[in-house]
Amino acid sequence: MQQHGNVPLQRSFRGSGSPLRVPDLLAQLVAPKPRISIHWFRRDLRLEDNHGLYRAFRDHGDVLPLFIFDTEILDKLEDKADRRVDFIHRALRTVQAELAKRGSSLLVEHGKPIEVWKRLLDRFDITVVTTNHDHEPYAIERDAAVGELLAARGIPFRTFKDISIFERGEVMKDDGGPYTVYTPYMRKWWALFTPVMSAPHPSEGLLNHLWKTEPLPMPSLEQIGFLPTDLQPPPIGFSEELLSNYEHTRDTPGINGTSRMSTHLRFGTVSVRELVRRSLESSPKYLNELIWREFYMQILWHFPNAQNAFKPAYDRIDWRNDEKEFSLWCEGCTGYPLVDAGMRELAATGLMHNRVRMVVASFLTKHLLIDWRWGEAWFAAKLLDFELSSNNGGWQWASGSGCDAAPYFRVFNPRLQQERFDPQLNYVKRWVPEYGSANYARPMVVHEAARERVLRVFKEALSGAGKAGDKQTNLFA
């Protein structure tokens, strides 16, 4: 793999094709390192309204933008045709093209961040590093290590709030504790919010403060160990009509009734401040969804052990964890059309309508009695818009184990959900074309029997009565 730290020297050798004289080589080796500041892109892959980038331009100048394909993350991805890596790569190419128009470039590295930064310190005279906050557990550890490395060289490591309006401990109860119920959190969010918080940081107006350099090469997907995909990313932006009708259309999977901005929010190709401003004008209901996102973010910040049930009693549940049934759920072959449509949409696109996410999660945890962590891991591997806090929060909500979760006795009836939200079968027919024919699978379980079983198992576990089997209930059609 090409090492970008050697690019200038490699290019000087290629130059005109003639041998490089020893004095010229020595002059290059002893030349002063370029003096620059660096903005480190992570979850903010845009030049517009980027808080950390704006502060780098405003306060420092000679900014070289950087992105690191982090092998600590990439090496854990089993699917080498991962749509998320492809999405990031495409977003970086867009940024690179814009930078090239202004005589600058994006430096793209591949490796462990701490090792990449050691190479960059050898290559550049770095005056300051800016970036935007990332509060997921791994990111906190990574940034602490990088910050320590930079501090040892006397280099400031400045981080800024960019992916949310409120973060960490900014929305707290009057007694100083974190909120674990959404509605009071939402009320306090609104009490603290002022319009200036959603004002843009106009980084796009300061691009003249970029460090001028010839275009730097970007590794291909293949060079970082991945493959191109069939990715069809949602467009950035949505109509005012969609936003104004959002409250009435958001639960209907068969129409274009949602913003489809979750992927762009996840990777920062759109600013959350822009979405908040637009929702303030047209759709309080849409803003409510953005506040849910921040609610789950602060839950993960205050309670980072996401692998355990938020309500410890739920870890006593005697999950059946039938691997064959789990595979049928993953493949979208459960015999329940709305569930199958959702799982097939996920496999084909990396996305799934939010209403359907709730139905498929309830089906796995309640109808099949399979541990919510299995479903959470499957979504984590497949979702284009995967965000740890929202994914964990959503799965624990569906299973009943999370904060402010659906009660254990709330069991979605997938047939009634289909009748209510896809009555014309527009969504089902798109993803389950064999529905209604002899080729369609029979239901894995009978809804009424599955509901009876899960109520018994959950009730006994939560009351401390011990484990329960399922021999008394005939579940199969």
Image: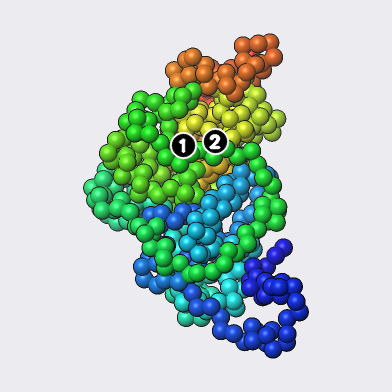
Under tag 1, what secondary structure?
loop
- Badge 1 crowding class, 10 Å Cα cut-off, few under 14, some 14 to 19, many 20 or more, is some
Residue 36 image offset from top left, x and y in percent: 49, 74
In the drawing, does residue 77 fall left or right of residue 151?
A: right
Amino acid, disc 1: Arg
In this view of the protein, can residue 414 be seen by the observer?
no
Q: Are marks 2 and 1 in contact (CB under 8 Å)?
A: yes
What residue sits right under mark 1 in the picture?
Answer: 260
What residue sits right under mark 2 in the picture?
Answer: 351
Residue shown at 52% from the left, 18% from the top: 426
Name the outermost residue toward the bottom.
Answer: 23
Instruction: Depth check: give the residue in front, 113 or 331.
Output: 113
Amino acid, disc 2: Leu
Residue shown at 50% from the left, 50% from the top: 267
* Colour option used: rainbow
Under tag 2, what secondary structure?
loop
Q: Quadrant of the N terminus?
A: bottom right
Q: Is residue 24 above or below residue 39?
A: below
Q: Nearer the viewer, mark 2 or mark 1?
A: 1
In the drawing, does residue 251 fall left or right of residue 470?
A: left
Residue shown at 47% from the left, 49% from the top: 269
Instruction: Depth check: give the residue in front, 372 or 437.
Output: 437
Instruction: Depth check: give the residue in front, 460 or 412.
Output: 412
Residue shown at 62% from the left, 59% from the top: 218
Q: Which quadrant of the view contains residue 432?
A: top right
- Badge 2 crowding class, 10 Å Cα cut-off, few under 14, some 14 to 19, many 20 or more, is many
